[in-house]
Image (tube, rainbow, N blue to C red):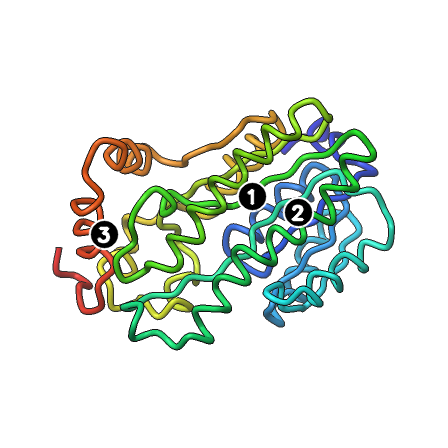
């Protein structure tokens, strides 16, 4: 980006969660390129490497390794902001979980729900109140096109993303006259470590690297939507077609299609 772009966020602060890799790291790079100082968080030690990489853009960066599934972890992140006004919150932290619901460990199920929903909306509640009081701010949630689909063999994850997609739209409406904008990034399968962490490398969707989006392109689209104050962005023609299909096909048909992508053992069979 050019020098003019770097002026946009100078002196402002962005908070990015799930920023150790993938879409979150790329979103943080978008912010740094625009001159935003950063507070970044993730539940992985690689967040320190991300801090060093982002500092190379000439902005101030503070990283927090904490579990954002816990309210205490969110509080730790909020405390790290140290009272500074937040201009942009990019709530990207999320976990996937593959395999059949009844075969999953319930502690893993609970962690996905607490990361994707509880921690996300708790952070949005804390920072959103501050934004509302200051009369300005931008919030970007990372939802998913998965939120439009009954997610066979990914049922809990898809359900959490349905919540995020819906919640973002509702919060946007509530805040429409406050100076605070709310946008939702809705990617499809993206080339990150998501599928490895979700134990989905033996699935059709997990193994098909050619069909996955570039996380840098996904993040750029989400960041630009946030900066423009747009309500949501679905990245990629194929993903837009998938969403369009879910609006007209019966749920059982969509669930069966999802099964073919996400059922264990389907890798390289379609």
Q: Is residue 70 above or below residue 39?
A: below
> SS at mark 2?
helix
In the rendering, at what x and y percent does residue 190 appear? 39, 50
Give residue 253's mark.
none
> SS at mark 3?
helix
CA gap between label 3 and label 1 equals 23 Å
In the rendering, at what x and y percent does residue 93 appear? 56, 56
Query: Which of these two is toward me, 171 or 83?
Result: 171
- Residue picked out by circle 1: 141
> SS at mark 1?
strand
Left/right placement of residue 113 relative to residue 123 reads left
Whether label 3 touches label 1, CB < 8 Å? no
In the rendering, at what x and y percent does residue 100 appear? 27, 68
| Crowd class of label 3 (few under 14; some 14 to 19; many from 20; radius 10 Å) | many
Identified at 70% across, 40% down, the residue is: 88
Identified at 74% across, 39% down, the residue is: 35
Whether label 2 touches label 1, CB < 8 Å? yes
How many marks do you count on the picture? 3
| Crowd class of label 2 (few under 14; some 14 to 19; many from 20; radius 10 Å) | many
Identified at 40% across, 58% down, the residue is: 157
Q: Quadrant of the N terminus?
A: top right
- Residue picked out by circle 2: 124
Give residue 258's mark.
3
Query: Which of these two is toward me, 76 or 188?
Result: 76
- Outermost residue, left side: 269
Residue 241, quarter of the rendered image: top left
In the rendering, at what x and y percent does residue 5 appear? 69, 29
| Crowd class of label 1 (few under 14; some 14 to 19; many from 20; radius 10 Å) | many
In terms of sequence position, does the residue under pointer 3 or pointer 1 come before the other?
Answer: 1
In terms of sequence position, does the residue under pointer 2 or pointer 3 come before the other?
Answer: 2
Q: Quadrant of the C terminus?
A: bottom left
In terms of sequence position, does the residue under pointer 2 or pointer 1 come before the other?
Answer: 2
């Amino acid at each position: 980006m050019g020098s003019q772009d770097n002026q946009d966020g100078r002196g402002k602060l962005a908070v990015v969660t799930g920023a150790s890799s993938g879409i979150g790291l790329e979103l943080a790079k978008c912010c740094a390129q625009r001159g935003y100082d950063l507070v970044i968080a993730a539940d992985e030690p690689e967040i320190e490497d991300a801090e060093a990489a982002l500092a190379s853009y000439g902005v101030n960066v503070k990283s927090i390794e904490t579990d954002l599934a816990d309210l205490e972890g969110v509080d730790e992140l909020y405390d790290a902001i140290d009272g500074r006004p937040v201009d942009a919150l990019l709530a990207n932290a999320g976990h996937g979980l593959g395999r059949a619901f009844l075969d999953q460990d319930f502690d893993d199920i609970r962690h996905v729900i607490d990361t994707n929903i509880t921690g996300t909306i708790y952070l949005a509640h804390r920072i959103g109140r501050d934004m509302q009081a200051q009369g300005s701010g931008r919030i970007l949630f990372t939802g998913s096109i998965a939120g439009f689909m009954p997610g066979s063999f990914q049922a809990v994850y898809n359900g959490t993303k349905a919540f995020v997609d819906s919640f973002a739209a509702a919060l946007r409406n509530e805040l429409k006259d406050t100076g605070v904008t709310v946008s939702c990034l809705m990617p499809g399968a993206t080339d990150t470590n998501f599928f490895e962490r979700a134990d989905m490398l033996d699935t059709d969707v997990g193994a098909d690297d050619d069909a996955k989006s570039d996380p840098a392109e996904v993040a750029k689209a989400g960041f630009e939507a946030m900066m423009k104050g747009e309500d949501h962005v679905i990245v990629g023609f194929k993903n837009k077609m998938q969403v369009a299909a879910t609006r007209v096909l019966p749920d059982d048909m969509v669930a069966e299609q999802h099964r073919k992508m996400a059922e264990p053992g389907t890798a390289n069979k379609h």
